[in-house]
Image (spheres, rainbow, N blue to C red):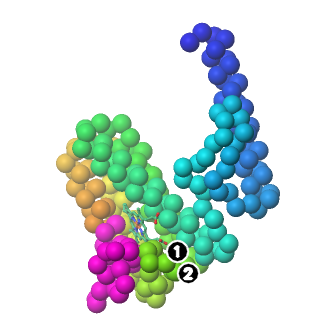
């Protein structure tokens, strides 16, 4: 790439940031509901494959953010799993730190009370059993901190073991507190 084209590239990246900043301001000030949108520009109309969620109440907003966070958590988890599987450790520590940070933040995503009204999502028991649910949050947090502590090392077996402990916490919490349509126990919760 010659000097001229790289400076043109810098300019166009600059315009992208400006356009994005204007769009964010518009969304903030108009209190608009961002959804799939078309951006006029050199790329032509742009349809976001995963549009921003809509929310009309604090509960819906919290649920939407909670689900996005869970997908982020899942992506970090899968990324760590893949780095171990393919033995490419490039992002292991960064993913593990992000996971631990998300786990620390998780309790906030369950306030205010916001059980799912649909066939999938957060069960009401989360708010009926704060102590038990709190134990799951704490268990997840400890497991992610343990993983972050070993992720910088070179021992793949140790990291894989810590990752399995994190996975256990995901599944334990989901088993009790997340309803998944079509899965056993989706309608009624198992007896304790
Ligand atoms: C302390 C409880 C808890 C832990 C720990 C937990 N989850 Fe969740 N997860 C939930 C609940 C509750 C929901 C349902 C949220 C809703 O729909 O409001 C959920 C939803 C999800 C979803 C669906 C998101 C969507 O778009 O609907 C994914 C994916 C997910 N979790 C992955 C994970 C993974 C991977 C881990 C572990 C690395 C994990 N979760 C740990 C409670 C937990």
Residue range in magenta is 170-192
Question: In the drawing, what numbered circle is on residue 110?
Answer: 1
Residue 74 image-quadrant placement: bottom left
Q: Which residue has dot 2 on it?
A: 113
Quarter of the image holding residue 121?
bottom left
* Cα gap from disc 1 to disc 2, whole angstroms: 6 Å
Q: Position of residue 111 (x, y in %)?
A: 56, 76
- Quarter the C terminus occupies: bottom left
Ligand 1 is within 8 Å of the C-beta of the residue at disc 1? yes
Q: Which quadrant of the figure shows ligand 1?
A: bottom left
Q: Position of residue 153 (x, y in %)?
A: 29, 43
Pick out the residue farthest to the right. Answer: 29
- Residue 24 image offset from top left, x and y in percent: 72, 50
- In the image, residue 135 sits, relative to residue 28, either above or below, namely below
Q: Secondary structure at mark 2?
A: loop
Quadrant holding the N terminus: top right
Q: What is the residue that sits farthest to the top in this orientation? A: 2
Left or right: 76, with 159 as reference point: right
Residue 135: tell me if it is visible: no
**Residue located at (47% from left, 84% from top):** 124
Mark 1 surroundings within 10 Å by alpha-carbon count, few (fewer than 14), some (14 through 19), many (20 or more) = some
Asked if the magenta segment contains residue 70, the reply would be no
Foreground residue, 17 or 56? Answer: 56
């Amino acid at each position: 790439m010659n000097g001229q084209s790289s400076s043109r590239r810098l300019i166009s990246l600059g315009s992208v940031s400006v356009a994005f900043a204007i769009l964010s301001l518009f969304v903030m000030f108009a209190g608009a509901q961002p959804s799939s949108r078309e951006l006029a520009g050199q790329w032509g109309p742009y349809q976001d494959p995963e549009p921003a969620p809509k929310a009309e109440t604090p509960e819906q907003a919290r649920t939407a953010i909670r689900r996005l966070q869970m997908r982020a958590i899942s992506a970090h988890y899968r990324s760590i799993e893949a780095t171990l599987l393919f033995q490419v450790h490039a992002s292991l520590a960064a993913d593990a730190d992000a996971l631990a940070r998300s786990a620390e933040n998780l309790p906030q995503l369950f306030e205010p009370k916001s059980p799912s009204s649909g066939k999938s999502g957060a069960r009401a028991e989360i708010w009926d059993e704060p102590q038990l649910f709190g134990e799951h949050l704490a268990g997840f947090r400890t497991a992610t901190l343990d993983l972050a502590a070993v992720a910088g090392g070179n021992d793949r077996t140790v990291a894989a073991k810590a990752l399995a402990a994190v996975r256990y916490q995901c599944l334990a919490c989901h088993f009790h507190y997340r309803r998944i349509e079509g899965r056993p126990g989706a309608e009624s919760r198992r007896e304790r």
